[in-house]
Image (tube, rainbow, N blue to C red):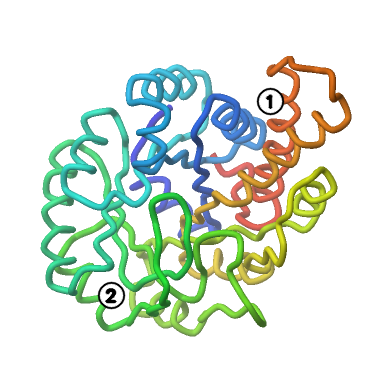
Amino acid sequence: MLVNTKEVFENAIKGKYAVGAFNFVNMEILQAILETAEEEKSPVIIQCSTGAIKYAGEDYLKGMVLASAEKVSVPVIWNLDHGKTFEDCTKAIELGFTNVMIDASSLPYEENVALTKKVVDFAHSKGVTVEAELGVLAGVEDDTQNSAQIYTNPDQAVDFINKTNCDSLAIAIGTSHGLHKFSGEAKLRLDILKTLSERLPNYPFVLHGASSIPEQFVSLANANGATLKNAKGVPEEMLHEACRLNICKVNVDSDLRICFTAGIREYLNQNPNDVDMRKYLAHGKKYVKQLVKDKMQTILGSSNKA
């Protein structure tokens, strides 16, 4: 069933767990996410970037999501990931998204406030919740690209939330987009997160760029022809700790890409004469389900919380 974030995040804060926000662009990954959420009895967020919407097509996405969400009993949030304009967000709301992210973090502070408030006012009139962003993550993923990391300022975050009335806030504490999140020792600014959690004890924060880049899937992909050199994600123990400090939404995209592709590569390498797409896509889907299940059980703590 499709819902917005309000009650889901309230429950996450009370229960000290986070909800996984998994990106998808096709039927197999969407099926894998929702089937696993149902099996794990976990609330879940399925999300698309503007690039994914352009790739799959609005009508196809809407049809897949509405048909799939009706078949599961757990709460499902359909989120627009990194909407950049007011029009991005209004189009998503009209399409049926139940939460939208307006990412104006690259704009000057007052412009970020103004655009976010405009989106919030419109979305709330439609029963849709809004995620905003303060601070800038480094890295490249889909339509998101930044070369510098700018950490979220706690004082500014409090002011921003009060001025915009956004329902959740994506913060920058050291994560980054893409496959290569750290060149040296992995480090998250959990001190910033702790300060935010103390200042805003019942407010939901969001962690972007939070793929852990599991070595087992990187190795599997490389063993079957990929060249994912020096891929490095966020250590799972750090993510686990963050999920106990008001991080209510954890974005996962790169991990899904790696394990899905690794599964397809493995199947085709083992079955070079097979051209049945159903078989190799199902093999990739199997690994996506394995990954999502592991996230829900061991990192997010969201299993049996629906």
Percent coordinates x, y for residue 240 in the rendering: 63, 65
Q: Amino acid at mark 2?
A: Ala
Percent coordinates x, y for residue 74 in the rendering: 51, 32
Q: Secondary structure at mark 2?
A: helix
Q: Is residue 199 above or below residue 79?
A: below
The N terminus, quarter of image: top left
Using residue 254 as the reference point, say whether residue 267 is left or right of it.
Answer: right
Residue at the disc numbered 2: 157
Q: Residue at the location (39% across, 79% down)? A: 151
Residue 281: which numbered mark, if any? Answer: 1
Q: Is residue 215 above or below residue 97?
A: below
Pointer 2 or 1: first along the chain: 2
**Near-viewer residue (23 or 304):** 23
The C terminus, quarter of image: top right
Q: Amino acid at mark 1?
A: Leu
Instruction: Work out which residue is located at the far right of the displayed protein and give it.
Output: 270
Q: Is residue 77 above or below residue 59?
A: below
Percent coordinates x, y for residue 271 in the rendering: 86, 24
All told, the count of numbered labels is 2
Q: Is residue 133 above or below residue 143?
A: below
Q: Secondary structure at mark 1?
A: helix
